[in-house]
Image: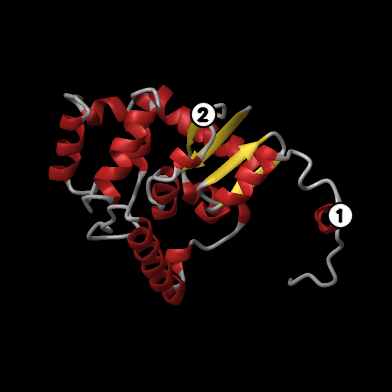
């Protein structure tokens, strides 16, 4: 079975989910899809968690708590949110290989490095054996791929990161990993009983 994993390097939750990929079955073919989270927020008219002060603090505390409980190395960079464009484009330019995705996430959230810093940016490029990262991320085809990935994600209903898309089902957030595992084991999970009823439940009120 195939699954698309939509992610943005700005998301600590995406890092935490990536660190749990070992729980996924070996038979699952994961296609890594870098997207611009800000583009998804704009598409759906949403605010990001870091744009709501109380939610921002809760987000950082929860991520640190979850990482500590799971024994995952975690250190937020000096500034967050940050502009992830260069990292996303670099990942795409290098073929979005799993090793590259992991290296960038760990650089940011295991080491707490700031990719907006030119010094850290050059250090990341050196680790990935890239001589001129600025030239690489400026390529038109790289930029267009990121835009296309983001449009594709929005078209499938993706509204946040990380999100797994399997067939027509979406699993948003690192805390849905267990639900994804249950669905992979039982693809009819959402088509019977209460799961089926709530899938078509009408709305009683809409906020203008």
Image quarter for residue 100? Answer: top left
Nearer to the camera, 82 or 208: 82
Q: How many labels does the image show?
A: 2
Q: Quadrant of residue 4?
A: top right
Q: Residues within 10 Å of mark 1 (few under 14, many from 20)?
A: few
Q: Does residue 87 appear in the picture of this structure?
A: yes
Which image quarter is the C terminus in?
Answer: bottom right
Q: Quadrant of residue 141?
A: top left
Q: Mark 1 points at which residue?
A: 193
For label 1, the SS is: helix
Quadrant (top left, top right, bottom left, bottom right) of the N terminus: top right
Q: Is mark 2 on a helix, strand or loop?
A: loop
Residue at far left of view: 119
- The residue positioned 15% from the left and 30% from the top of the image is 126
Up the image or down, 134 lies above or below 54; here it is: above
Mark number, residue 10: none
What residue is at 52 percent from the left and 38 percent from the top?
Answer: 24
Does 89 appear above or below 46?
A: above
Question: Within 10 Å of the Cα at label 2, are there few (<14), some (14-19), or many (20+) other Cα atoms?
Answer: few
The residue where tag 2 is placed is 26
Residue 94 place in picture, x, y as percent: 33, 24
Q: Where's residue 55, x and y in %?
A: 46, 72
Instruction: Decide if residue 159 is in sight here.
Output: no
- Nearest the camera: 161 or 62? 62
Which residue shows up at 35% across the image and 58% down it?
67
Choose the circle earlier in sequence order: 2 or 1: 2
Q: Where is residue 145 in the image (x, y as percent from the top left)?
A: 47, 28
Q: How far apart in space, not on screen, are marks 2 and 1 (Cα)?
A: 30 Å
- 168 and 10: which is toward the camera: 168
Q: Where is residue 98 in the image (x, y as percent from the top left)?
A: 39, 29
């Amino acid at each position: 079975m195939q699954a698309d994993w939509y992610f943005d390097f700005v998301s600590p939750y995406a890092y935490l989910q990536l660190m749990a990929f070992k729980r996924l079955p070996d038979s699952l073919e994961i296609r890594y899809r870098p997207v611009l989270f800000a583009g998804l927020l704009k598409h759906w008219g949403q605010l990001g968690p870091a744009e709501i002060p109380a939610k921002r603090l809760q987000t950082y505390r929860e991520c640190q708590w979850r990482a500590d409980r799971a024994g995952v190395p975690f250190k937020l960079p000096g500034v967050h949110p940050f502009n992830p464009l260069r990292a996303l484009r670099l990942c795409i330019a290098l073929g979005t290989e799993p090793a590259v995705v992991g290296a960038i996430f760990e650089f940011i959230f295991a080491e707490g490095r700031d990719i907006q810093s030119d010094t850290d940016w050059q250090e990341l490029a050196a680790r990935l054996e890239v001589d001129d990262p600025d030239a690489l991320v400026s390529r038109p085809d790289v930029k267009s791929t990121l835009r296309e990935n983001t449009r594709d994600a929005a078209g499938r209903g993706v509204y946040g990161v990380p999100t797994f898309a399997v067939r027509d089902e979406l699993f948003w957030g690192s805390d849905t990993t267990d639900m994804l595992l249950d669905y992979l084991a039982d693809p009819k999970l959402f088509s019977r009983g209460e799961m089926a009823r709530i899938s078509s439940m009408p709305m009683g009120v809409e906020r203008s």
